[in-house]
Image (cartoon, rainbow, N blue to C red):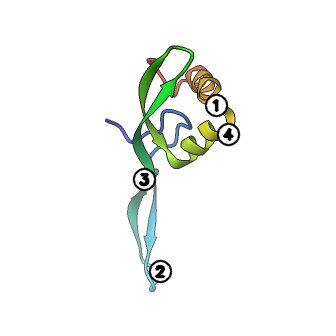
Amino acid sequence: MSKICQITGKKVVSGNNVSHSHAKTRRKFYPNLFDKKFYLQEEDRWIKLRISAAGIRTINKNGLAAVLKKAKAKGYLDKY
């Protein structure tokens, strides 16, 4: 499974490790992802999402149905 949030679209980005001598080596920054189940009341079922911490806060703020609709419109979510 890819390391992409299904709500916010956050994914792995690359950058540099910078040492004290200012030598740079490449590294990756990973999103803070969780596999989490949510109850979707409109359809009376549970759904599993691979979601970042920011995505969980977004769902708490705006509601699951509204966030799923917006994520599907942006193309982050394919099957719900």
Earlier-in-chain disc, 3 versus 2: 2
Q: Nearer the viewer, residue 47 or 23?
A: 47
61 is higher (above) or lower (below) than 80: below
The disc placed on residue 61 is: 4
- Where residue 40 appears, x then y in whole percent? 52, 23
* Left or right of residue 62, residue 32 in this image: left
Which secondary structure, mark 1? loop
Residue 65 sits in quarter: top right
Q: Nearer the viewer, residue 52 or 16?
A: 52
Residue type at numbered disc 2: His
Residue type at numbered disc 1: Gly
Calculate the distance from the C-alpha at mark 1 to the C-alpha at mark 3. Answer: 26 Å
Calculate the distance from the C-alpha at mark 3 to the C-alpha at mark 4. Answer: 24 Å
Between marks 2 and 1 in the image, the one whose residue lies nearer the viewer: 1
**Residue that extends furthest to the bottom in the rendered view of this protein:** 21
* Few, some or many residues within 10 Å of mark 4 (<14, 14–19, 20+): few
51 is higher (above) or lower (below) than 72: below
Q: How many marks?
A: 4
Q: Residue at 57%, 25% (x, y): give it.
A: 68
Q: Which residue is mark 1?
A: 63
Q: Which residue is mark 3?
A: 30
* Few, some or many residues within 10 Å of mark 1 (<14, 14–19, 20+): few
Earlier-in-chain disc, 2 versus 1: 2
Calculate the distance from the C-alpha at mark 4 to the C-alpha at mark 1. Answer: 6 Å
Q: Residue at 54%, 34% (x, y): give it.
A: 7
Residue type at numbered disc 4: Lys
- Where residue 2 appears, x then y in whole percent? 35, 37
Between marks 1 and 3 in the image, the one whose residue lies nearer the viewer: 1
Q: The N terminus lies in which quarter of the figure?
A: top left
Callout 4 touching callout 1 (CB < 8 Å)? no
Q: Which residue is mark 2?
A: 22
Which secondary structure, mark 4? helix
